Image (cartoon, helix red, strand yellow):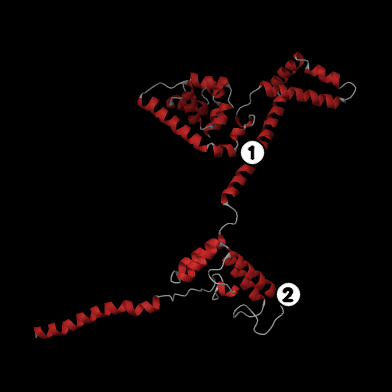
Amino acid sequence: MAAGLAARAVPGAAGRRLGLLLAPLLLAPLLARPAEALVEGLYCGRRDCYEVLGVSRSAGKAEIARAYRQLARRYHPDRYRPEPGDGPGDAPPSAEAFLLVATAYETLKDEETRKDYDYMLDHPEEYYSHYYHYYSRRLAPKVDVRVVILVSVCAISVFQYFSWWNSYNKAISYLATVPKYRIQATEIAKEQGLLKKAKEKGKSKKSKEEIRDEEENIIKNIIKSKIDIKGGYQKPQVRDLLLFQVILAPLHLCSYVAWYCRWIYNFNIKGKEYGEEERLYIIRKFMKMSQSQFDSLEDHQKETFLKRELWIKENYEKSRGAQLSGHSAEGFSNLTVLSSGSS
């Protein structure tokens, strides 16, 4: 009985092994895609672009262009006169024939596109890669992306430059209305005789309004030359424009890395004491202010920060807490900028 069971089990196992071997062979015709060189939707579709133009695969650019001009004149919709059986190859004699000729020429006139097309003819089995190459070339931008970026950066830089000059002129106009700066500028103008010269020149030729405008411009020019405005309203510098920042970005990166390494080595490893510049840097970081905002502060404010040793975290937190709680009027007057910087 055992021998009978063993005899029946052997054919069953052999059948299963045979089924596993035959399964891929049976599924292969269903999964495989027929390898056809000409694919609908790519290039000239089911037509051969070389046959459409009536040239061989070894034809040069001049021969392809000559064949295209002849067929284009022949099948142009405005000049075409239908004749029985007329058309490139098997194409019907209509405007579609002209479009087919134009497509064939666009495919073969460009070396890269022609190379992709020849590769498709020689390797029809790489079905999906042909789609990728075809649409990647069609959808690729016609203009170099680098040119677009360069033009955009230049346009932004020009806008920045004129915007900064506008802000700077507004700041000068505002300072000209502040009594402290206006009186100083007027005294300097009188000492140099600029206001007197303006009045003498305008006695016979200019009206009072024109003389007043000229005197106002003199005062503003003196304020520009005598007062160094810092922060967001400072005098525009070409090196601050985006274009130059992009160009100098590698240099700035290297400088920052070198500065950071020196900071770690001097203060973290060797344990040196902070200098005035390093102390102000730490205070600015605590206050969460940009460099331009911190530069716009008065010198006496920065001296107050140093006297109160605000580069030490505990001292900064105490001063900040005193300002918020209102316990120290002096702290409030000296640290008013902290509220804007830390909020």
- Residue denoted by label 2: 79
Q: Earlier in the sequence, mark 2 or mark 1?
A: 2
**Rendered view: 62 above or below 160:** below
Q: Position of residue 98 (x, y in %)?
A: 65, 73
In the picture, the disc for residue 160 is 1
The N terminus, quarter of image: bottom left
Nearer to me, 311 or 317: 311
Q: Nearer the viewer, residue 54 or 114?
A: 54
- In percent of width and height, residue 31 lies at 39, 75
Q: Quadrant of residue 2?
A: bottom left
Q: Amino acid at mark 1?
A: Gln
Q: Nearer the viewer, mark 2 or mark 1?
A: 2
Q: Are marks 2 and 1 in contact (CB under 8 Å)?
A: no
Q: Residue at x 50, y 65 (%)?
A: 116
Q: Is residue 198 left or right of residue 15?
A: right
- What type is the residue that disc 2 sits on? Arg
